[in-house]
Image: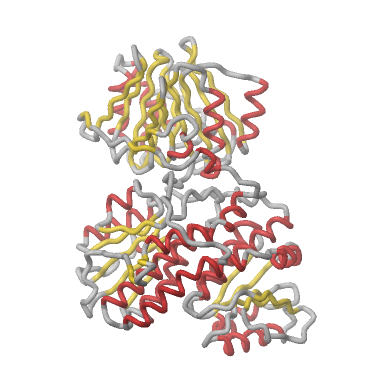
Amino acid sequence: MDFYSTTKETAGIELGVYMCGIIAILSSKPVTGRLVEGLSRLEYRGYDSAGVATVHENTIFRKRAEGKLQSLKNLLQEEPISGKLGIGHTRWATHGSATKRNAHPHKTDRVAVVHNGIIENYQLLKNELVNSGVQFQSDTDTEVVVHLIDQALQSGKTPEIAVTETLKKLEGAFALAIIFKENSNLLIGARKGSPLVLGIGENELFLGSDAWALAPWTQKICYLEEGDIVIMKHDIAFDYVILNEDGQPVTRSVRQLEQEVNVASKGGYSHFMLKEIFEQPKTLANTISSLIDEKNLKSLINLPIDFSNERLTLRLVACGTSYYASLTAKYWFEKYARILCEVDLASEFRYRDPVLGRNDICIFISQSGETSDTLAALNLAKSRGCETLAIVNVPESSMIRAADHHILTLAGPEIGVASTKAFSAQLAVLCLLALDIASKRKTIDDATMKEFLHELLEVPNLVAKVLQDVSVFDQLGLRLSCSRDVLFIGRGTNYPIALEGALKLKELTYIHAEAYAAGELKHGPIALVDKLTPLIAIAPKDSWFEKTASNIQEVASRGAPIIVLTDDANFNMSSSEFHKILLPTSSPFSACFIYTVAVQCVAYYTALHKGTDVDQPRNLAKSVTVE
């Protein structure tokens, strides 16, 4: 019996991961406790500081604390605040350091605001406000929004008009939730570039950065679209109206959440990241089986794109971990589909004025579908006449709406800041896309296609075997936890996996780690090798194995500790500083999935022994909205 049998499931609640998290509640009962609960479900998005504000008896009450959410919880226990209308925020610092004075909400006597995103023209607006006599209390860009609304209120404008006029002055990206001293029954939200979700409950309304943050209280949600303003009121009943960017009332679809509330539970695991590592057999099975007709071994990808053009070029564009998935896929597209493939960092692609044309198909990869650099790159490609494809995990995301075509990964919500299951799901989609294109271009025959699809269907079981005994990674993590520097090497599709392994180790442990193509060591990086610098080699028994083994020997002869991840039981070295982790045997085609999970485990257990914060590494958030 298979360790894990594949099933098809829905992706559940869509989780758009982004910098900072905001929540707002307009209710018939007190909201402070639920604001904090909602922030706890959003803290993975940023955790430099947190705060809440409520309106009660025509007064805005605010509490803020530096550091993680527990600091705010402790403060509220000592100094509780009341109110049936409130906003909350957990921050990833951009403008201004992570201090209490820079924590959200920002307020005047009349208005309070929480903000996710960045106001690009804030300095110009701030200068104008200072010249008019406004005194700023923080170093943030957000505070200009507060003072602009406040000035409009002072001039006699209604809250709705004050907000609308202020938004017209702002450049950049924002999701805003705004409350007012003089109206405890009014909550206004606005979205431009940053996601914002409306929740509709029984005798209450909600705003949140992510739908699942609202899941304990409502399953009816509405995704605001670009430029939307939502005005939420409690007069006789709780009601709302949504205005588009032209100020016209519009109707947005209301959908039912399908995933249960305990999506954010660790499920008995010590960390979300460990839970998500162990979820990969399931999420890989969901993603793979959604794109394969298992009975007939055929691809279910049915993109209306003509891939037969011999002059066609694929351009893969992404950031961070998604970029490493793209580098891996380049091997598949070129080897199997025989199609030229270029890979770009989205932040570079935007500004190097790339040569693009109608022979280019541009593929954009993002977990959230909201990553600002990747989204801007997508829009650039569309403006140049390129056909665009988005590979994302969030059906309601901006990239889904902007791209000509899309394919969903079914990884489900990922809470740990360091990506695990989202990355492996991206690999699965890209691999299947490469095979689908190869089949359409007749660069592989039907029999070979069926063999590859059969191998992919076995990947979840192979990954599950890696996770059957993680004690070897635990022992290795203990050894590595005292290291100052670590080197990774790999060849072929496992070179990008080495890059991903080094990134994971850096993110989680703060150990300096670098990855190189194994053949490049002798061209400079070998100068870094010494007895205190471990080498982790990704070395499956493939066509590159003998070359990689020679590179490992070159490093070992210089006294470095050697750790080899391999499926070759016969590979050994005489050095006492040699350690081997034997992994399941696989084909070169599917090996990257196995070694991906292995390097994730190496990073996790090293961090565990080093004592760092696994789920919330310092200075990080799941995805950034700024350049």
Task: Examine the rendering and report whether any part of residue 502 can be seen.
Answer: no
In the displayed orientation, state which residue is furthest to the right.
576
> Percent from the top left, x then y, of residue 92?
52, 43
Residue shown at 43%/31% (left/top)? 218
Up/down of 527 relative to 514, above or below: below
Residue found at the very far top of the displayed protein: 57
Between 336 and 610, which is closer to the camera in this rendering?
Answer: 336
Residue 623's spot in the image, x, y percent? 47, 51
Task: Tell me if residue 303 comes above or below residue 442 in the rendering.
Answer: above
Looking at the image, residue 624 sits to the left or right of residue 615; the answer is left
Horizontal side of residue 578 vs 313, given as left or right? right
Q: Name which residue lies at 56% across and 70% down.
A: 462
Left or right? Give the position of 384 relative to 453.
left
Residue found farthest to the front: 1
Q: Residue 605's quadrant in the figure?
A: bottom right
* In front of the other: 608 or 487: 608
Residue at 61% over, 46% down: 267
Residue 516 falls in image quadrant: bottom right
- Above or below, comparing residue 395 to residue 438 in the picture: above
